[in-house]
Amino acid sequence: MSVTLKDVSKLAGVSLATASLVLNNQKGVSEKSRLKVLDAAQKLGYRPNILARSLIKGKTNTVLLCAFIKEQGKLSAFYGELINSLLTAVSYQEFYLQMVVKGEFYNGHPLDKRTAFLDIAHNRLFEGLIILSHWPISYSEVGDLVKENFPFVIVNQKVDGEGVSYIDIDHYGGTKEAINYLIKKGHRRIAHIRGPMDHLHAQERYRAYVDTLLENEISLKKEYIIEGNFRRLSGRTAMERLLEKKPYPTAIYAANDKMAIGALQAAKENGLNVPQDLDIVGFDGIEAVKYTDPPLPTVEQPLEELGKLAATMLIENIKGGDRRKVILPCRLDTWDNLNQKT
Amino acid sequence: MSVTLKDVSKLAGVSLATASLVLNNQKGVSEKSRLKVLDAAQKLGYRPNILARSLIKGKTNTVLLCAFIKEQGKLSAFYGELINSLLTAVSYQEFYLQMVVKGEFYNGHPLDKRTAFLDIAHNRLFEGLIILSHWPISYSEVGDLVKENFPFVIVNQKVDGEGVSYIDIDHYGGTKEAINYLIKKGHRRIAHIRGPMDHLHAQERYRAYVDTLLENEISLKKEYIIEGNFRRLSGRTAMERLLEKKPYPTAIYAANDKMAIGALQAAKENGLNVPQDLDIVGFDGIEAVKYTDPPLPTVEQPLEELGKLAATMLIENIKGGDRRKVILPCRLDTWDNLNQKT
DNA sequence: CTGAAAGCGCTTACAG
DNA sequence: CTGAAAGCGCTTACAG
């Protein structure tokens, strides 16, 4: 069996209490005892049972990242980057990160997030929770966490209501910047390949597209707005349809980079020069848009910042700080200095 | 305070033991007691303290992914995908995944992996360990784990020796397939932009390049071999240098995709048509090579498979199965059916 | 079928 | 400064 504190205290010839004191660097132990204990621990290769310690202290120094995703196993590259920065930030504060993914259903029933959260809050394994979800979280689902004052932060989604911490990206502002960039370049016929309208971020990006055109006294044209599904192929199809319009648009704002790439491919296949004949801007900042020909401007999501701040906010909250709501700005990157970048 | 089993047993009017039995679905309890306990638990919103349970049972159902990385916070996209599949596979087996990253140094001293592993094995938090490292792991570092029979698996690296589990990708075989593809297309002047030679996988890819050329009676030319650093820009520079050779190569095998992309960019800027004038093949299967113009063939790393198998091997081992050494085949993807793919 | 008791490995008042 | 004792929340023999 493994070495316990009892073994150490016995070998050192002191009591359990003394051994514990020494190994936790508490003062009030004679140098002589200290040495004996340290020596014994060393000899036996003693390592504390963290489980037992956590049970007593009621602290585990561990937080849980709980990701709700549509298709099991399909955390996207997006999440990969986020996890990286969460992990780094969490480690930095001497916390540990545990992860779990949950799908839409559990045992054939729609997953009850409310109960899932309660389980997490009560099982005493975690001191805080980071929530990531492909579909909207409602206040009622996290209400219990608020009531019990269990630290949590929702990432990448705004949830209104008292006592909720969240951090999201300014999709509206980022889009606005993209559209203004196109307008400033002289474009008036700006189309939008939007995302699915049940997607919160797609909604915001769409709203910003509409508002920014109108603010600039460019009238909206229904035929310039086409809905895609965030996949590359849907961008391609959308572009083909846009090219049938007369006159066809001179600029495209795609709600994400993959659709922008699809649009680029279709445009090139139809003999257009990008960006001379057609400007295309996407959203997300995935790596691939740096390497298309030409590289595609994109509104970059500050994922590193997102993860870092989420971790910081959560741990602050664990330590007694207040809950916060944060919207992170994001900016257009036009790759003017690409060759310094990678 | 939170609700404990004691509270439940009190409310139900039974002993602790009975309550425990009921809530663990053990039989040998009267229906009447069962109902009372269930009812009380429900009313109080009881959730077991997993910490206490784990302490007794000596089982946590949790495994740790320990990643050693050069630059703190720089788990690449590669790891993102791997984590995804690990997480999915681990969840599927009703285990949990905890993660920690460690750098090369700790408190200014080179990190002592041996001790780090012992800590992990002894703290009783984890039943198994997945090791991922940017730099080579030696047998001596994991020897203690072997000796203590603590389940672990090394991912993405071969470590010889008794009692070690690892899973790696067949970099040699994958490269061979890439080179053969180029030879079959008629190329004889095949250059190699290789990776840093202190990198194990770069070594294997280089070795396969050499062997395959020689097997096909193509003599090696030193000036066709240039070392890069796995970054895009180094592929670009390498390509520029290769274009100065007379005759210049008609095909490039780059040791990774980023350098392949850099090579592509340099080639295009120098007026070459790819693939008509120059064939370029990379390694890794990152998403970006699908969207360059033209898309670049690449040897795809089966990351999903890698993560899944790693998790399976580890959990098998935890459950008493044997340790295994696995090399995963990987194959060249030439994107013949790209438009069905994304 | 049921309850009193011991114990998992540790920490922390409390006397001395 | 030190040790005996209680206790964290639970599970599991053991009597009855």
Image (cartoon, coloured by chain):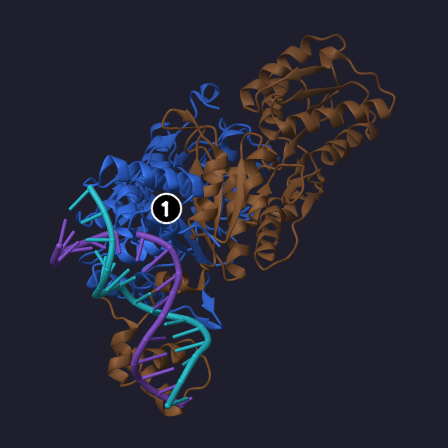
Chain colours: A brown, B blue, C cyan, D purple
Q: Is residue B89 visible?
A: no
Q: Which of A174 and B2 is in front in this view?
A: B2
**Quadrant placement of the N terminus of chain A:** bottom left
- The residue shown at (22%, 55%) is B164
Horizontally, residue D9 falls left or right of residue A82, namely left
Please determine whether, in this image, residue A271 is positioned above or below residue B324: above
- The residue shown at (70%, 38%) is A170
Residue B6 position, x and y percent, is 36, 53
Residue A210 position, x and y percent, is 77, 22
Question: Total label count?
Answer: 1
Residue C9 position, x and y percent, is 30, 67
Mark 1 neighbour class, 10 Å CA radius: few under 14, some 14 to 19, many 20 or more: many
Q: Nearer the viewer, residue A43 or A188?
A: A43
Q: Is mark 1 on a helix, strand or loop?
A: strand
Q: Which chain carries label 1?
A: B
- The residue shown at (45%, 28%) is A104
Instruction: Point out the residue furthest to the right here.
Output: A217
Please determine whether, in this image, residue B104 is positioned above or below residue B278: below
Q: Is residue B342 visible?
A: yes
Res B146 quadrant in image = bottom left
Q: Which of D6 and B145 is in front in this view?
A: D6
The residue where tag 1 is placed is B96
Horizontally, residue C3 falls left or right of residue A146, namely left
Res A89 quadrant in image = bottom right
Residue type at the position of mark 1: Tyr
Residue B220 position, x and y percent, is 35, 46
